[in-house]
Image: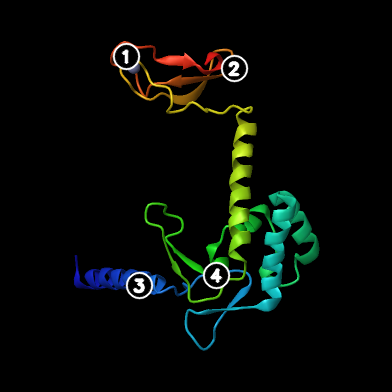
């Protein structure tokens, strides 16, 4: 490694460490500021609530609690606010979803949000916009909807017994799985990870369980 490279490497590492240390202190990163906030011009990496947009954020949460549907929430918010400013140019389902799940709105700074193994949460230096109870309620509703969506996609099939059925020959907990047969029909069954090492039945047809 030539010296210039080494120096660049060191600088990159230092930058990453600094960014991490700032986030641990609850400071905002240099990226996009969430809807409802603006950067504090006096204090670097602090956010201040921008009341006009904060009202819209609250309305998004309240609408979702009422409608219990991302699509309906999007339609309502889009109709009222799309295009009113540069931050609301396009209101999509994923935009609504990311707002509803953004803990910045309850004053939490998420670190490594996209990396589940490393993710951390600290108290943010900014104020929340959404009532914590409403945020939690929305989280529960979203979870329910995900389960419902999943059930609909698997033709209402739930592997309710996953991990509860044990093979009596080897004691392994059997997991729900599915596969297409030669006639392209989907089959559901509970099965060992591989084959049973003690000669037990490898698959139990879920339809008959
Ligand atoms: Zn077994």
Residue 205, x across and y down, in percent: 50, 15
Q: Is mark 1 within 8 Å of ligand 1?
A: yes
Q: How far apart are marks 4 and 2 (CA)?
A: 46 Å
Residue occupied by mark 3: 21
Name the mark nearer the viewer: 4 or 3. Answer: 3
Q: Is 141 located above or below residue 125 in the figure? A: above
Residue at image position (49%, 86%) is: 43
Q: Does the residue labelled 4 lie within 8 Å of ligand 1?
A: no
Residue 170, x across and y down, in percent: 30, 18
Q: Does the residue labelled 2 lie within 8 Å of ligand 1?
A: no
Residue occupied by mark 2: 185
Residue occupied by mark 4: 32
Taking the image as shown, residue 29 lies to the left or right of residue 127, namely left
Which one is earlier in the sequence, the residue at label 4 or at label 2?
4
Name the secondary structure under disc 4.
Answer: loop
Which one is earlier in the sequence, the residue at label 4 or at label 3?
3
**Image quadrant assignment for residue 13:** bottom left
Residue at image position (51%, 89%) is: 42
Contact flag, marks 2 and 1 (Cβ < 8 Å)? no
Residue occupied by mark 1: 169
Q: Is 108 located above or below residue 177 in the figure? A: below
Name the secondary structure under disc 2.
Answer: loop
Q: Distance between the residues labelled 3 and 1?
A: 53 Å
């Amino acid at each position: 490694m030539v010296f210039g490279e080494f120096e660049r490497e060191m600088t990159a590492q230092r930058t990453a460490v600094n960014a991490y240390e700032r986030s641990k202190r609850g400071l905002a990163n240099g990226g996009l500021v969430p809807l409802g906030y603006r950067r504090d011009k006096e204090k670097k990496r602090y956010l201040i609530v921008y009341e006009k947009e904060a009202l819209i954020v609250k309305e998004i949460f309240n609408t979702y609690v009422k409608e219990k549907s991302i699509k309906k929430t999007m339609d309502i918010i889009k109709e009222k606010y799309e295009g009113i400013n540069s931050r609301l140019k396009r209101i999509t389902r994923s935009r609504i979803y990311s707002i509803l799940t953004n803990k910045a709105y309850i004053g939490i700074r998420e670190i490594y949000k996209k990396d589940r193994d490393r993710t951390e949460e600290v108290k943010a230096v900014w104020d929340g916009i959404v009532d914590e109870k409403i945020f939690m309620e929305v989280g529960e509703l979203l979870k329910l909807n995900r389960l419902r969506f999943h059930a609909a996609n698997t033709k209402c099939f739930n592997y309710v017994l996953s991990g509860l059925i044990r093979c009596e020959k080897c004691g392994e907990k059997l997991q729900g799985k599915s596969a297409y047969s030669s006639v392209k029909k989907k089959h559901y069954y509970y099965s060992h990870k591989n084959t049973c090492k003690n000669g037990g039945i490898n698959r139990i047809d879920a339809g008959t369980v």
